[in-house]
Image (spheres, rainbow, N blue to C red):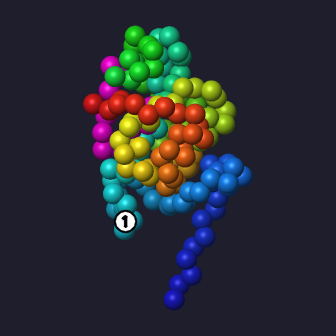
């Protein structure tokens, strides 16, 4: 019987371990390809970086199967208008490349407002990036929101 390969801990894993926050490390590409058994595409969330006309950078987290509503997001974040941060500016703004943005790592470096779509609260658990491509974590939605000081809101289209 083959031994289960032990995953190298990402910085996000290390931060959560240090804070004694329960989570599960996952190794898969959620954007394309086959998903491991027991993982529904709708439970995987993308972390989007936007800029608000009043607040500056802010983070929206929605299921990968959905689209963020810029109109709803602007309203809940006290902006008149929000727009996606251009990909060329993403790494210098958040510290992460496209596909690796995650709320834990971003909160460690920046005090950007973070909003998670309320469907995550209803699900109880969510899967978000672990700060590296093809690496994710599964975590209790409320625990994650509390740790990164995020608010739940209806922000998807």
Up-down relation of residue 22 to residue 48 (above or below): below
How far from the left and from the top, in percent, is residue 63? 36, 43
- 150 or 71, which lies in front? 150
How far from the left and from the top, in percent, is residue 10? 63, 53
- 132 or 60, which lies in front? 60
In the rendered structure, the answer to whether residue 109 lies left or right of residue 85 reads: right
How far from the left and from the top, in percent, is residue 38? 37, 65
Residue position marked by numbered label 1 in the rendering: 38
Whether residue 68 appears in magenta in the rendering, the answer is yes
In the rendered structure, the answer to whether residue 103 lies left or right of residue 117 reads: right
Q: Please, what secondary structure does the residue beneath circle 1 have?
A: loop
How far from the left and from the top, in percent, is residue 61? 44, 36
Q: Residue furthest bottom?
A: 1
Q: Residue at x 64, y 62 (%)?
A: 8
Specify the segment rendered in magenta. 60-71
- 31 or 155, which lies in front? 155
Q: Residue at x 27, y 30 (%)?
A: 157
Can residue 137 be seen at all in this image of the molecule? yes
Can residue 88 be seen at all in this image of the molecule? no
Q: Residue at x 39, y 23 (%)?
A: 73
Q: Residue at x 67, y 33 (%)?
A: 109
């Amino acid at each position: 019987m083959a031994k289960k390969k032990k995953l190298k801990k990402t910085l996000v894993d290390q931060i959560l371990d240090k804070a004694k926050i329960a989570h599960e490390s996952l190794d898969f590409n959620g954007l394309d390809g086959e998903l491991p058994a027991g993982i529904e595409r709708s439970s995987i969330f993308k972390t989007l970086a936007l800029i608000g006309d009043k607040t500056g950078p802010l983070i929206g987290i929605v299921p990968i199967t959905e689209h963020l509503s810029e109109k709803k997001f602007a309203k809940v974040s006290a902006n008149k208008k929000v727009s996606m941060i251009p990909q060329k500016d993403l790494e210098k703004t958040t510290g992460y490349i496209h596909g690796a943005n995650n709320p834990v790592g971003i909160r460690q470096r920046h005090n950007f407002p973070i909003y998670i779509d309320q469907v995550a609260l209803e699900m109880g658990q969510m899967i978000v990036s672990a700060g590296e491509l093809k690496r994710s974590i599964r975590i209790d939605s409320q625990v994650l929101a509390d740790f990164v000081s995020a608010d739940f809101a209806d922000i998807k289209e």
